[in-house]
Image: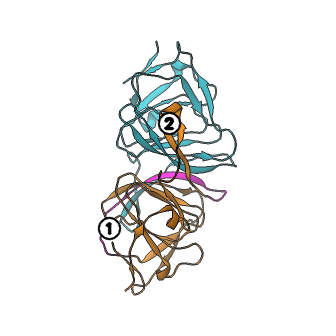
Chain colours: A cyan, B orange
């Protein structure tokens, strides 16, 4: 039985898969004549020429742990960002772009409660796991014509179990 | 002295200027095999051909009220969205696209604490006012080459005072 233990989410370790959306490690810029600080361009949304970046909202139910990850997916036409609207950690499971990852190649990360994540275009990932509470997310991803979701399924024997 | 009283933010009243980012009034879609609900494409980010949509974060200080609005701005190369990460209302002041609005043409709205807003490309707007508390926002707007901010200033005599 393959067990996958999430590691703390850091920009360095997540870099092969995309960006961590957080203020830590990014110097702010002054904005609005001293009334605000801004951290611009923490993630650049990728789309094909026919697509746009769109903003949506997601409400995720609370997942039971351990959770067996039977499906990974990727979006060939654009990148995808999730930013939590509640101060609650979540778990992200990722593999590289290209061929669907073997279960042993998957990596899991747990956020610190304020971090968001941005999957680069084509990066394989699991469903966003919210085992600590139900949560709301803001989602920014590609909208437009065409099929932008590919799935890959693991057998019950090979699919990894996520636990903290 | 021109006084501008914010009205409750609704999708209907804000439609000439852009979108309200909220779940109210939008039917959700199932996602992740019943583990999540999704409200996709609540706002479509506009950019010129050289630009991308980028995600940033903003920390806004608490503004004193009444506040005299001396400056409005617009972004000719792309649209701009602000979504609060705290459950706190804020005030948005908008005018139409095109010529800079006369002070009497400005409209002010106050959000309900969960709503975000999306200014369409070229729509004149004031600085986001956060008079109820300091607040964090997620910002999605156009990044790329070129000058994407125009300002218009009102004289002290004509500039409106915002109060609740």
Q: Quadrant of residue A121?
A: top right
* Side (left or right) of A23 relative to B65: right
Name the quarter where the N terminus of chain B is drawn.
Answer: bottom left
Separation (CA) of disc 1 from disc 2: 37 Å
User: On screen, B120 above or below A74?
Assistant: below
Q: Residues within 10 Å of mark 1 (few under 14, many from 20)?
A: some
Say which residue label 2 marks: A15
Picture mark count: 2
Say which residue label 1 marks: B63
Nearer to me, A91 or A19: A91
Q: Residues within 10 Å of mark 2 (few under 14, many from 20)?
A: few
Give percent across and percent down for residue B127: 43, 68
Is label 1 in a helix, a strand or a loop? loop
Give percent across and percent down for residue B36: 48, 37
Give percent across and percent down for residue B37: 49, 40
Give percent across and percent down for residue A156: 53, 15
- Tell me, yes or no, whether the two marked residues, 1 and 2, touch with CB atoms within 8 Å: no
Residue located at (70% from left, 41% from top)? A146
Q: Is residue B96 magenta?
A: no
**Chain ID of residue with mark 2:** A
**Chain ID of residue with mark 1:** B
**In this picture, which residue range is highlighted in magenta?**
B47-67
């Amino acid at each position: 039985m393959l067990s996958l233990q999430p590691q703390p989410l850091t920009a360095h370790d997540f870099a092969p898969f995309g960006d961590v959306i957080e203020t830590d490690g990014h110097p702010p810029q002054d904005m609005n004549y001293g009334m605000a600080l801004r951290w611009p361009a923490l993630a650049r949304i990728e789309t094909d020429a026919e697509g746009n970046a769109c903003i949506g909202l997601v409400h995720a139910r609370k997942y039971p742990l351990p959770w067996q990850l039977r499906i990974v997916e990727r979006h060939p036409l654009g990148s995808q960002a999730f930013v939590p609207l509640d101060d609650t950690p979540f778990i992200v499971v990722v593999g590289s772009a290209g061929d669907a990852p073997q279960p042993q190649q998957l990596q899991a990360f747990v956020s610190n409660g304020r971090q968001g994540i941005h999957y680069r275009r084509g990066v394989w990932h699991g469903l966003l796991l919210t085992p600590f509470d139900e949560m709301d997310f803001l989602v920014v991803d590609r909208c437009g014509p065409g099929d932008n979701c590919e799935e890959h399924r693991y057998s019950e024997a090979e699919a990894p179990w996520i636990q903290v």
